[in-house]
Amino acid sequence: MKKITTLIIALTAYFNTSISQNNWVQKASLTATGRGFAVAFSLNDMGYIGSGVTGVSLDDFWEYDPVDNTWR
């Protein structure tokens, strides 16, 4: 279930869709380093992703604001 939730958060942060029109719109790209085994979750209408590995452990965390369509 955790993998499905992470995938849904990532896709929702990256794309927004209108099901009735079958129209996908790209959202702001995360400019952080690509990674494996990241942690992602949502809290209070914000999306978060961070940590993970790229050969070394990462300790950064990013917040996505869907209203402003920005990562910080």
Image (cartoon, grey):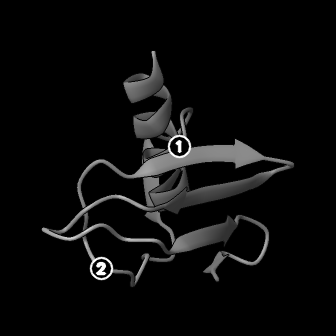
- The residue under label 1 is 9
Label 2 Cα neighbours within 10 Å, binned few <14 / some 14-19 / many ≥20? few
Query: Which residue occupies 23% across, 54% down?
Result: 36
Is residue 56 or residue 16 the one in the foreground? 56
Is residue 6 or residue 50 the one in the foreground? 50
* Amino acid type at mark 2: Thr
Q: Distance between the residues labelled 2 and 1?
A: 18 Å
Up-down relation of residue 36 to residue 32 (above or below) = above
- The residue under label 2 is 33
Residue occupying the far left of the picture: 55
* Percent x, y of residue 28: 50, 76
* Percent x, y of residue 72: 64, 83
Is residue 57 or residue 70 the one in the foreground? 57
User: Which element is circle 2 on?
Assistant: loop
Residue occupying the far right of the picture: 44
Assign the N terminus to one quadrant of the image: top left
Up-down relation of residue 39 to residue 22 (above or below) = below
Up-down relation of residue 30 to residue 31 (above or below) = above
Query: Which residue occupies 54% across, 34% down?
Result: 19
User: Which element is circle 1 on?
Assistant: helix
Front disc: 2 or 1: 2
Residue occupying the far top of the picture: 1
Query: Which residue occupies 50% across, 29% down?
Result: 5
Query: Which residue occupies 65% across, 68% down?
Result: 64
Q: Which of marks 2 and 1 is nearer the N terminus?
A: 1
* Percent x, y of residue 8: 48, 36
